[in-house]
Amino acid sequence: MLAQFLSITQSADADNSRLESLCDEYPVFFTQLLDAINQQQLLLPVKVDSIAQAISLGALDGIRHLLQLMVIYKSFSQYKIRGLDQQAFWQDSLRRAVSARMLGSYIGLDTSRCFLAGMMQDIGLFCLFLDQPAKAMLWPEFRKREPQARYSMEENVFAYNHEQAGDVFCRHWSIDEGIRLPLSHHHTSDQIELSLPDKQLADVLNCADWMAAIYTAADKSFVIDRARKMLADDFKLARFQIEEICAAIPRHVDKAAEAFHIDLQPHQAFSQILMEANYKLSVDNDNFQELTLRLEQALEERDRLAEELNRELSLAREIQKSLLPPMRDDGFPVCGVNLSARDLSGDFYDYFELDDGCIYFNLGDVSGKGANAALLMAKASSLFRCLGKRIKHPSELLAEINKELCETSINGMFITMIAGMYQPATGWVQIVNAGNPPALLFSADGIAREIEAQGPPLGIMDNAEFPATEFYLQDSSLYLFSDGVTEGLLEDGTMLELGGLYTFIATLDKNLTPAQRIQAIVSLFQSNQRALRDDVTLVLLERQD
Amino acid sequence: MKYKESEHGRFLIIHLEGEVDLSCSPKAREQILKGLKNKRHLLVDLSAVEYIDSSGVASLVEGYQQARSQQMDFALVGVSKAAMQVLQLARLDKIFVIYDSLDDCEA
């Protein structure tokens, strides 16, 4: 019967006598249809007594749309899918339909087309559930989401969306192109070229979706804000019109439901929803203020901790400096300098006299930098001083320190150290190099000799041996340095390297004091603007008469 | 620093590339220790290392110490010139087992 009717209305000029005979044949259905035509007020300005009269007044398209709607509703409402609450589903559809109809009338679109399209907007989702009924349990979750999130959820759940499914449905049911195209692109109208009326209908559908979601979404204040913004920006509605149109939805839904004989669940008034949304906004606002306050407190706490940390670092730096021996101007044969790349240094040097007049001196470099290197440096220099007063041979001393460090080695950290003993009375020097860059021994006539490492760094192998190199110092100068010196960057960005250091020392003014000479070397790295890459440390041994 | 892994018989090979300095040596250390924790004999390929500082060397030393305490094999392979200079300077070439290439090492 419906099919017969549809075919009559789809022809260009309807055959009124055939229509009337159909009406006589199915009086109940056509009373319903007539009701729908009359109650849908927007279809015709006056009440009509018969379908034929309505058609003669030019409502043929509208009637066809109404019929399609009734057919679709009757076909789909017979399915029972577990999890999908049909009553709520059609109620939501009616909200979209009446919203679309109101919007359509504002911008002069055919309102029956808007109504049908709005009603069919979620038919695609229905089809997806029909295809995969097990997923219908998720429908309440879909319903709670705002339109955009629902769209993404569809893609996640079905790897398909209601636009695509709606498109298939429309083709199958031979729905007008003027409805199919906007319907299958109402969330994605910017991705396809649509005619102006189609684009307008797509925008109407999208906005109607948001308006209807006011009544179903979990986060109502977000949806209300978005709907208001769309209505103001895209439809140029004034604030009072927006409130009016949103508040009118339930009333129009009631009327339309009556016309289509769709049962409704009780629904909330817009004012009630607004109250809830405003309450949530005020709670959010409180939460926001609370968050701001906590953030401020956290920042203050951070500044306080940073200050504390800086204070501790400078204290540590001070203590570390105090571990270095003071510069002596009493004709002592050893002097040293240390320039730290960070607050704390991993390099160190030391020298001290024993009871018999012999002098121990050393220079060390802990692997890595920062606080852990500094702590290990403190340990190594203490060991050197403590054990050095008891063990009178540098080879034995370093073997002993090495054993101690191996026992408590951590994270593979190790120490390169070059240490020696000088006997001022005879000029006898014993020197041991544990993994450190070579020492440079410059004779008075400018000839240099390298004293290379004979043993591995300390803290790696507990049974390592550290053979000593022995010689008389005479008029020579012995330079000890850490790798920060040879790897230090000069003003032009190149590394000094061993050759550069050799040349620089060879050309230093002979009248400079030992302290001035090592200071001159350190100045090579201080004159440029670059940050130091590594700690720079030097020790110089020279006979003083 | 770039980092990748490959297999060579009973060995897990850790390939380090580029500059192994303080900024990335913790990553190298983590990978080396992870390999040892998984009871793997380790080869560290240093053929593409352009620069290694003492923190990088420390990661190797820790691997060496850790492997020794677990009786696992730990060796360096294809050590680049830049890395070898550092190792030699510190006499560490006498400590690590070093293979010229994978062919020299019994898988």
Image (cartoon, coloured by chain):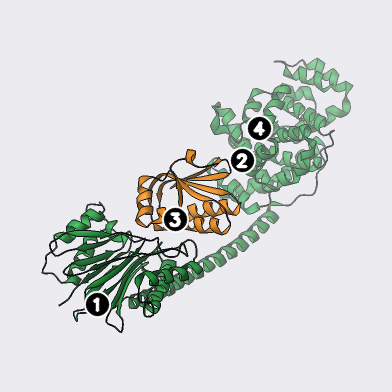
Chain colours: A green, B orange
Answer yes or no: do the residues labelled 3 and 4 have beta carbons within 8 Å? no
Kindly state the secondary structure of the residue where label 1 is placed: loop
Judging by the rendered image, the residue that carries numbered circle 1 is: A327
Mark number displayed over residue A163 = 4
Query: What is the CA distance from the residue labelled 2 to the residue labelled 3?
Result: 74 Å
Q: Earlier in the sequence, mark 2 or mark 1?
A: 2
Q: Nearer the viewer, residue A183 or B92?
A: B92
Q: Quadrant of the C terminus of chain A?
A: bottom left
Q: Residues within 10 Å of mark 4 (few under 14, many from 20)?
A: many
Judged by depth in the image, the label closer to the viewer, 3 or 1, is: 3
Q: Tag 2, which chain? A: A
Question: Dot 3: within a 10 Å radius of its alpha carbon, few (fewer than 14), some, or many (20 or more) residues?
Answer: some
**Could you give the CA–CA distance between mark 3 and mark 4, rounded to whole angstroms?**
69 Å
Task: Please identify, in this view, whether the residue under mark 2 or under mark 3 is nearer the observer.
Answer: 3
Q: Is the N terminus of chain A in the top left, top right, bottom left or bottom right quadrant?
A: top right
Could you tell me which secondary element the residue under label 2 belongs to? helix
User: Is residue A531 found left or right of A132 in the rendered image?
Assistant: left
Sequence-earlier tag: 4 or 1 = 4
